[in-house]
Image (tube, coloured by chain):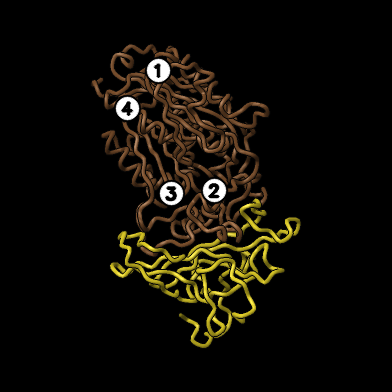
Amino acid sequence: MNGDSVTPITEGLFTVADGLVRLIGSQCARCGTVAFPRQFSCPKCTSVEVSERLLARRGTLWSWTIQCFPPKSPPYAADDPGAFEPYGVGYVELPGEVRVEARLTEADPGCLRIGLPMELTLVSAPGGGTRGVVTYAFRPVTEEPDRGGTG
Amino acid sequence: MSAEDVGIIGAGIHPFGRHPGVTGLQMAVAAARAALADAGVSWPEIDFAAGGSDAAGNADTSVAMLGLTGVPFVNVRNGCATGGSALTVAHAMLRAGSADLALVVGFDKHPPGAFSPDPEDWGLGRWYGETGLMLTTQFFAMKIQRYMSEHGISTATLAEVAAKASRNGALNPNAWRRRPLTAQEILASKMVNHPLTQFMFCSPGEGATALVLARGARLRGSARPLVLLRSVALRTRSFGSFEVFSPSIAIESAPSPTAVAAAAAFEAAGIGPADVDVAQVQDTESGAELMHLAETGLCQHGEQEKLITSGATGIGGRLPVNTDGGCLANGEPIGASGLRQVHEVVLQLRGGAGERQIPGRPRVGFTHVYGAPGVSACAVLSR
């Protein structure tokens, strides 16, 4: 996806560089703990010596569900409340880093399983689709490893 | 009985369910009056009070209806642990000798449908809610999904948990849902969050519960069968535990707040999980009940399928769980549920639970609540 044509749902959550989306996390300088979204203190050792870290783009599905009913708005930002489509939600384990919660591009329970290789992507954000607002999501890895996108 | 003992001498409840035209505070006052009457205590005798709701107002405003006695009254708003937190504070006040007779009250009144929390109240960005991640139901679904794969639990067992809750609820005149459901009906109900269907989830609802606690002469002099509050423990999450409303979780794992609070409660009581005759555990959905059974130490991880399908957790089983129907049959008025559990244990230990009374004169009871963003309160009671 071209980084110039999209508006992130919020600043500081992810970045797009050379066509590849990366989540912006943080890492503790003292104990190495990785957190997402970026934190300014370490949730494990309490240190405030924490710096930004771009997270891996690939991981495996740790757990998942399908959101089958429309969440209440607010806080949900629905494009058209009458046209709700179920969506997948999961935690993707980024090896050696952290497990990230995200929407999944796949909403068919038959196509999701724990351990499935997943890759970061961008999708239209609920409520912002017509304005080009995007958020991060994970999709099952279907193609051969892409060019240097393993983070 | 020792001088430090704290007991529960009164228990009152306002029926759970939907009560159009009745405010949460009115339900709280009704429950408080019922608890006072049960204890044979008048409101002016109460020298400490604590309580709260999540969404139905400040507990201490109930004094306008109960009577303006000047009693010290602490408002608690601590999510699903609201009742447990009020109990913790009252227990500590009595143990410290700072009060002799305490009232705790929990109540709530939620609109129909899933909770719709504001992300910013939980330290999260608005994006988290806007993109459809701010749902407690998703957390429970993903936790049980993972748990089922690790411990070999089947979907049929999830349905059995809900069927048991509905059978128990049918025996409880204060429960909201009083129609027994079959496992087939539960499995066939609308999918909410895989693998959990509609009838495997509790619903936000309405209700109130109150208890009168006593120490010393007021405890010894009570006309009610003695029920001691042996311990209460309240804990928040540790780094590495998997909790509600987490945009990420650590790869390393740590015991849940449930596990830590339960262990602390058992240690303080000098009673072990194996001694428990009746337990009420947080059953936001079917999977939560079975996971919490193992986290609290009441069974081993992976043992639940056998325990549940053999009927051991039913009334008359070896370890009756959620004998009043739990959240599944009573609904979830957040501020009221924790004290509802204690209310049920008090009735069971007194032998006064009516049609749902478990046989064999139970001696030890246990209660457990869990809620966002990773808080748990546990209590141990005994005759």
Residue B172 appears in the figure: no
The disc numbered 1 marks a residue on which chain? B
Marks 1/3 in contact by CB < 8 Å: the verdict is no
| Mark 3 secondary-structure assignment | loop
> In terms of image quadrants, where is residue B171?
top right
Question: In the image as oriented, which residue stretches furthest toward the left?
Answer: B2
Residue, disc 2: B158
**Residue type highlighted by circle 1:** Ile
Q: Earlier in the sequence, mark 1 or mark 4?
A: 1
The disc numbered 2 marks a residue on which chain? B
Tell me residue A104's x, y (percent).
59, 67
Q: Colour of chain A?
A: yellow
Q: Quadrant of the N terminus of chain A?
A: bottom right
The disc numbered 3 marks a residue on which chain? B
**Residue type highlighted by circle 2:** Leu
How far apart are labels 3 and 2 at the CA level?
Answer: 23 Å
| Mark 1 secondary-structure assignment | loop
